[in-house]
Every structure is written in C-alpha cells, then in structure tokens.
Image: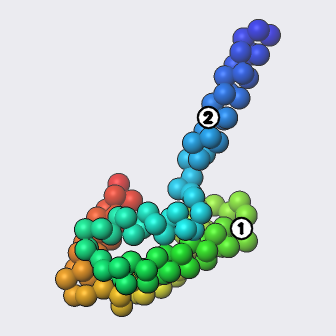
Amino acid sequence: MRKLIIALGFMLCVVTFAKAQGGGQRGGTPQERAERSITRMEALKLTADQKAKLTEVFLAQGKSIDSLRAANGGAGFEGMREKMAPIQAATTKRVMTLLNDEQKKSYEAMLAEQRARMNN
C-alpha cells in the first residue's frame, strides 16, 4: 500500500511539472507562434514591412489551426495533419508572395530542412 501511495504521488508530480512546462505541446497563443515563426526567419533579413505582413499571415494561420483543433476535439494526429495541410499550403503561398527571389530560395531551403527533420 505504501509503495502504491508513493507511486501515485510521483505520478502526480510528473503530471504537474509537465503541465507547468506546457505539457509537451508546441503551443502558445497564435501571437507567440507567429513571433517564433518570424524569429526563425531572421536569416532572411526581412524588412520591417515584411515582418509586419508576415506576422499577420502567421497569426491568421495560428488562429485557423486553433479553431480546427477546437472543432476536432481529440482526433488523432493523422486526421489533424490532413486538415492542417491546406492551411499550411495557403500560408506558404502567402509567405512566398511577400519575399524577394533570394529570400524565397532561402525560405524553400528552410522548409526542406524542416521536412527532413520531421521525417526522421
């Protein structure tokens, strides 16, 4: 009985700390995720105007994804992945319209690297 109580206490601590650290979600608010996206794009040497417009694009994406998650409830990863793909494709298309030719090449390389990491 004593071991069971200790084990349950340990599990409670782990869950509490996981929640405090964000619970393993990639989360944050849409604004925070948009800011992280802009930060990852610093190598592209964006202008202030580009940063403002791209922040709006990523913010819209974040809001769309959040509403999709809320509507989808506890659906599995594959179901969400299918529904998020058009949102991500539209975001990429909008981002590309805001970049110059040199920035587009660098952004495409960033996306390819990201896809490679996700596949591994």
Up/down of 86 relative to 79, above or below: below
Please state if 41 lies on the left or on the right of 52 as rendered: left
Q: Nearer the viewer, residue 11 or 94?
A: 94
Q: Is residue 82 above or below residue 25?
A: below
Q: Amino acid at mark 2?
A: Phe
Residue 89 appears anywhere in the view = no
Q: Residue at x 57, y 42 (%)?
A: 21
- Tell me the number on the disc at residue 101: none
Disc 1 and disc 2: Cα gap in Å?
A: 24 Å
The residue labelled by disc 2 is 17
Residue 14 left/right relative to 111: right
Depth check, front residue: 35 or 8? 35
Q: Picture coordinates of residue 118 (x, y %)?
A: 39, 59
Pointer 1: what residue?
70
Q: Is residue 101 visible?
A: yes
Q: Measuring 67% from the left and 35% from the top, which residue is drawn there?
A: 16
Q: Secondary structure at mark 1?
A: helix
